[in-house]
Image: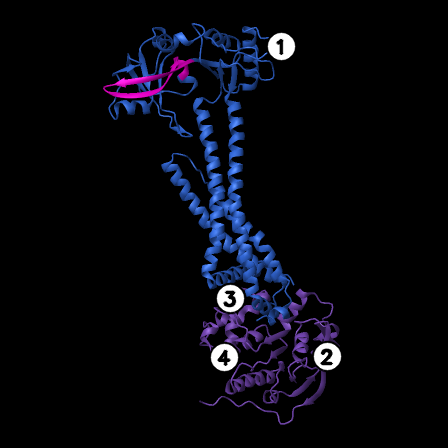
Amino acid sequence: MSQPLVATADLVKTYELGGETIHAVDGVSLTIENGEFVAIMGASGSGKSTFMNMIGCLDVPTSGIVEIDGIPTSDMSGDDLADLRNRKIGFVFQQFNLLARTTAVDNVAVPLIYAGKGGEERRDLATQKLIAMGLGDRLANSPAKLSGGQQQRVAIARALVTEPLMLLADEPTGALDTRTSEDIMQIFQQLNDDGITVILVTHEDEIADHAKRKIIFRDGKVIEDSIVTNRRIAAPEVAA
Amino acid sequence: MKKSLGSRLSAWLVNISIAMTALRTNLMRSILTTLGVMIGVFAVTLAVGVGSGAQVSVMESINSLGSNMALIFPQPDSEGGRSTFERGRLTTRDARAIEREIDGVSDIAPQLRASITLISSGNTASTSAIGATPAYGRVSNVTAQEGRFITDADVRTAARVVVLGTSVAENLFGDFNPIGEQVRINRIPFKIIGILESKGSSFGNDNDDVAVIPISTVRQRFVGDTLAGPDDLHILFVGFQDGVQLSTAKREMTDLLRDRYKVRGRDGNPFTIRTTEEFMEETGQVTGIFQTVLVAIASISLLVGGIGIMNIMLVSVTERTREIGLRMALGAKKSDIRNQFLVEAAVLCVIGGAMGLLLAIAAGAALTAYANFPVPIGMGVSIGAIIFSALVGLIFGGWPAVRASRLSPIEALRTE
């Protein structure tokens, strides 16, 4: 029952670059339980994003084990991994990665296409998530007609639409101003309170302080794994 | 986890809508790419139409001769043997022998042909005269639409009467009804007794540019001194009853005539026999080759159009690598990505194909109306053109689509 949501054992990822072997992730073993809020930190090149991509089943480890919800992923085919991502993992990216010239509803509905849901169900579920994100009046807007914060909220709605177990957010506030970042962090905290595991990659201490646990990478290894003391609680938006 | 039919259908509809968005995004590029397929499908469809038009046209003109008949010419035929006759022979007596001795003969229509010039009240027309008997009308389905056709009495008395084809009548008299009028043929006065039923034209050849005159009159007045014998013929039509095997009849007639001309062993004949069956077969082959060549040439433009599709799909895949990565991250399988780009290529091609088809139908109609050449583009060809366009999309979009589906999600996502 108490099986971890994410478990890695001796996880390694190496690249060949100009005849030199780069150890991007160098033997990382850790577990993340259901309901955690984890910030993965580290300088650029520390291996935090590569680690994130591997537990998100986007990238394949050179060696070592990744288990998601108790399922080992090393022997899974590309299509099985796609299915796993679709059902269990929601992604939030720094650059939002919304489809241009596509309405908010249609953007949010994309994962449901690959879940095999029908058109009407897709629209209904996507609309629900957008309303929950406070975008009920922006359903038919294309990304070009939305602010950065609104775009990231569409992206979060998209990540949530298949009811995944965890959210993986790679520098989700990297393209946003401080005020908007605070809004987004509030959403993440709220979602975590509702029971979703949140794992975010950031290099900003202020953002990481919103999490409950902080894991710091350097040179492909975990150098610190600690509970966040003095956790920041994102303030509700004040009238500007 | 098996997907239901509904969700499969829905997935294809989604792909079509994704494709339409992508095509609208690069509208000018899409239009230019489509143009290639449009021209290709236009050329191929029109080639098919022209080819079958030629076939129809030739078959019609063969049918206008009469459906089940043989033509015998006094031309030496050394097929499969030695040439022995310098000059061909075919006489009225041969015709009668055929009528008497060959089974299944329904009519014999001996003929003489002559070039004639008709003059009436200052108008002149040159045409070819068919010196015939009433049987010619029966064998070749030729009738008078006004007045009357020639009769046995006309032939017996070598009457100076003529039945004009509609073109000749028009050239000489315009709208005026000439029946009963006098006309001078090669300076000899004739009486116009009828106008032939129009037979249209085939292959630019006007079937109504003729005049029918009793065979005896033609022999006496126009060609008598050029013939080898007093009852020689230029051509003999032999009509057969329905169901007669023409190849068998041809063999029997050949044997009979060889016997009459005392041709032995492997020697050639002083006559040539052709049947409508052979004409059909030969022209079927010729027009078949004609159509194949046309379609082959036209296919080159479709090939070029297809390569254009492949080119633009490769560009599209490269441009949208990040989108592909995103879709994979959100759960798209290889087949989802592949199908998305296949559908995009197919949609592009089907739009081009539909436009090409419409253009071909319009061009075919124009050719039929103004060039008097039938270009039938039927439902079958139309559906075929659309299906074929989709196939072009699937074939030439296949490689780019498979390439897209093989991208690694993380590599694709990292692309700027």
Amino acid type of the residue that numbered disc 3 sits on in the rendered structure:
Glu
Type of residue at label 1? Answer: Gly
Left or right: B39 as drawn, with respect to B131: right
The structure residue drawn at horizontal position 75% and vertical position 74%, both measured from the top left corner, is A65
Number of residues whose C-alpha sits closer than 10 Å to that of mark 2, classed few (under 14), some (14–19) or many (20 or more)? few
Which residue: 46% across, 52% down? B35
Q: Chain of mark 2?
A: A
Cα separation between marks 3 and 1? 86 Å
**Disc 3 target residue:** A120
Residue named by callout 4: A148
Q: The residue tagged with tag 3: helix, strand or loop?
A: helix
Report the residue marked by disc 2. A3
Circles 4 and 3 on the same chain: yes
The residue wearing badge 1 is B265
Q: CA distance from mark 4 to mark 2?
A: 37 Å
Q: Nearer the viewer, mark 4 or mark 3?
A: 4
For discs 1 and 4, the disc positioned in front in the rendered view: 1
What hue does chain B carry in this figure? blue
Label whose residue precedes the other's in the sequence (2 or 3): 2
- Give how far apart the Cα atoms at labels 1 and 2 are: 102 Å
Mark 4 or 3, nearer chain start: 3
Q: Between tags 4 and 2, which lies in front? A: 4
